[in-house]
Image: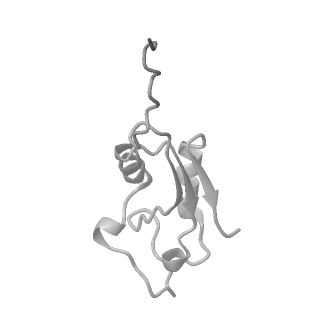
Amino acid sequence: MTGPAAPQPDLSIYSASKVDGHFHVLDPDRFAWAGDVGYRPAGQETGSADHVAQVLDACGVQRALLAGPNSCYGTDTRCLLPVITDRPERFKVLGLV
């Protein structure tokens, strides 16, 4: 005779903790593109820090590494500051200094 079945681990990707290892905040309404860049994102490629947080929430991402968007801001990293200042427990930054 056997005992009760052992509980099965929850292997669902939806309940697992998630970290986004590389994302950008591209917000031309608040931070103008650098003048000498060849790439200028538009439409759904852009959004505020709040918008990005909502997208990550919808995907179940708890933490994320923000990468400096050199392709449209050059070496200007001011666009990174509101994200890490407003949500330091959730976001960390990788960028040029």
Q: Picture coordinates of residue 62 (x, y %)?
A: 49, 42
- The quarter holding residue 29 reads bottom left
Q: Picture coordinates of residue 54 (x, y %)?
A: 36, 46
- The quarter holding residue 10 reads top left
**The C terminus appears in which quarter of the rendering?**
bottom right
Residue occupying image coordinates x 45% and y 45%? 61
Residue positioned most to the right = 97
14 or 79, which is in the foreground?
14
Residue occupying image coordinates x 56% and y 75%? 70
Q: Picture coordinates of residue 38 (x, y %)?
A: 45, 88
Q: Picture coordinates of residue 69 (x, y %)?
A: 53, 71
Residue occupying image coordinates x 43% and y 14%? 4
Residue positioned most to the front = 1
Residue occupying image coordinates x 45% and y 72%? 32
**Coloured how?**
one colour
65 or 33, which is in the foreground?
65
83 or 31, which is in the foreground?
83
So how many labels did they put on this image? Answer: 0
**The N terminus appears in which quarter of the rendering?**
top left
Q: Is residue 20 above or below residue 2?
A: below
Q: With 44 as the anchor, is 27 left or right in this view?
A: right
Residue positioned most to the left = 43
